[in-house]
Image (spheres, helix red, strand yellow):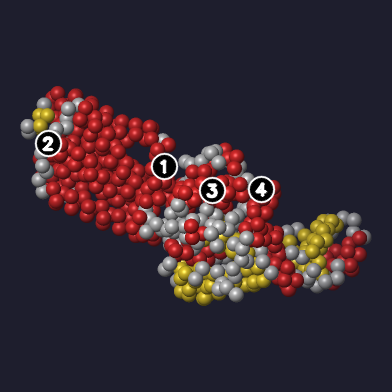
Amino acid sequence: MSAPVVVSRALTKVYAGAPVVDRVDVNIDRGECWGLLGPNGAGKTTFLRMLVGRTPPTSGEIRVLGYPVPQQASAMRARIGVVPQLDNLDPDFTVNENLRTYAGYFGIHHSRLRARIRELLEFAALSHKADAYLSTLSGGMLRRLSLIRALVNAPELLVLDEPTTGLDPQARQLIWQRLRSLRSEGITQILTTHYMEEAERLCDRVTIMDHGRLLESGHPRALVSEHIEPHVIEVHGEGLQRWHKETAARLAPRHETAGDGFLYYLNDERPLLEALSGQERLSFLHRPANLEDVFLKLTGRELRDG
Amino acid sequence: MAESTTTLRRIPHRTARWLPVWRRNLRVWSKLALPSLIGNFGEPLLYLLALGYGLGALVGRIGDMPYMFFLASGIFCSSAMMTASFEATYSAYSRMAVQKTWEAIVTTPLDVFDVVVGEVMWAATKSLFSASAILIVAWALGAVSGGYAVLAVPVALLSGFCFASMAMVVTALARSYDFFLYYTTLGVTPMLLICGVFFPIGQMPAGVQTLAWALPLTHSVALARPLITGAAPENALLHLAVLALFGLVALSVAATLLKRRLDA
């Protein structure tokens, strides 16, 4: 069994007296895709900044690929790839020049570069855009370029901060497919996202973070079955309040308001579905429980603007 | 995409890690070299021609030196200052705050210090380009004499390093482009006017002269003017030391401030 790729112990970052990351312990194993979920301001970004050696912890420690960080961050970063939340590609350069220039920061030898870049462009379906300027690329293409830029040094660990935010479904599918193929090559991945279905599809293990603390960690399906009843029925419509009070609240003791509707969590869905069948004015959706239910249960429903 | 990685990576040595940053800027510049040259070199050239012929006809000589000689060697230094100052403020700030180029670089083995040194070295290199262009024009106008003039070129590089480092401190503190107006108005323009570029420092009141000697451009001129006009500079080591000291102190201040700003 090889050593974990990332180990942190009581990792803490305090800004202006308030802990943003609070005594965080993680072990990320080689080859896994580890998802970090949390509302805005939960401390995800600060955790990642400490992980790549961009900001020193206030206390506690973190080792990445065996290197103590930030003391040996530079040597560590030579072996990882980072896909930032917002593209910071070089607008003055073509696709090819972006990759060459970035490779230069790793001191990658010219003789090896041409073949490597060709391979990466193919991987990202960007071969036909090699000499194009970035202004001619779609959002999905730019994202893919950010991804292969992070692969230019053949990293053992890939850190992805919201890799598909703002992309259309086709573009997201393509990124997901590429991330799975990197995963099958054994590249460890750390991923933050606001899309629960993205975490469910890609991650071997997700960790939910809030207020700087790690709340839960586990395989997405295991977390769902541990925290949420298997059936969820969402109900909307006229007269809902009354029907809820008279019927549903009794049939589904665990429920929540969600906007102008109700969510009912059930081990046995049949009684509630039967009760709904006579209600013409109510519309409903019956679905399996998912990671979003877990996320909202653990982090609450109030809006986070921050 | 896995790859036998030992063949691929060769992390640059600590002391050479700024080089890829410098090379990145050179690569961008080489795409836009013409407009950039016109910007860096056109304006000082116009000053040189207009003042050299216009004012030169009235002034005649300064001491035993034709005014065109005096002016060309002064503008050689001021163009180095202007180029470095602009590059390390407006251009560097764009890369830091707007394009987030630095943000991308510091996720590689390079860190903020490497970026700052690379940017300063690059701005110094641009100073070298524009001052050299002035030197060639001055030579074509017959305002260069003697072989020492070649030694003025490294002086331009050192001056560029000094002014770029000073400007980088301003960039470290800037929250928007408007901030650079303070530095231009309170730092760069006064130096341009009182450090002996257009007329001798001795023309000014004693207090202003003292101030002038406390500013690096004066020392840059004190080195370059004799070299370009065919004499050996006096107190050369002192002037070199002032430029180097200003540069090194400013560079370490800038690096500390930027480290704090970007890696908080």
Q: Quadrant of the C terminus of chain A?
A: bottom right
Disc 3 with disc 1 on a shared chain: no
Q: Element under label 3?
A: helix
Q: Quadrant of the N terminus of chain A?
A: bottom right
To which chain does the residue with label 1 belong? Answer: B
Image location of residue A78, percent across then percent down: 47, 60
The residue under label 4 is which amino acid type? Answer: Ala
User: In the image, what residue occupies the spot 71% across and 65% down?
Assistant: A291
Tag 4 near tag 1, CB within 8 Å? no
Question: Pointer 4: what residue?
Answer: A171
Gap between marks 2 and 4 measured at Cα: 66 Å
Q: Element under label 1?
A: helix
Q: Is residue B196 at least partly visible in the picture?
A: no
Q: Quadrant of residue A240?
A: bottom right
Disc 4 with disc 1 on a shared chain: no
Gap between marks 3 and 4 measured at Cα: 26 Å
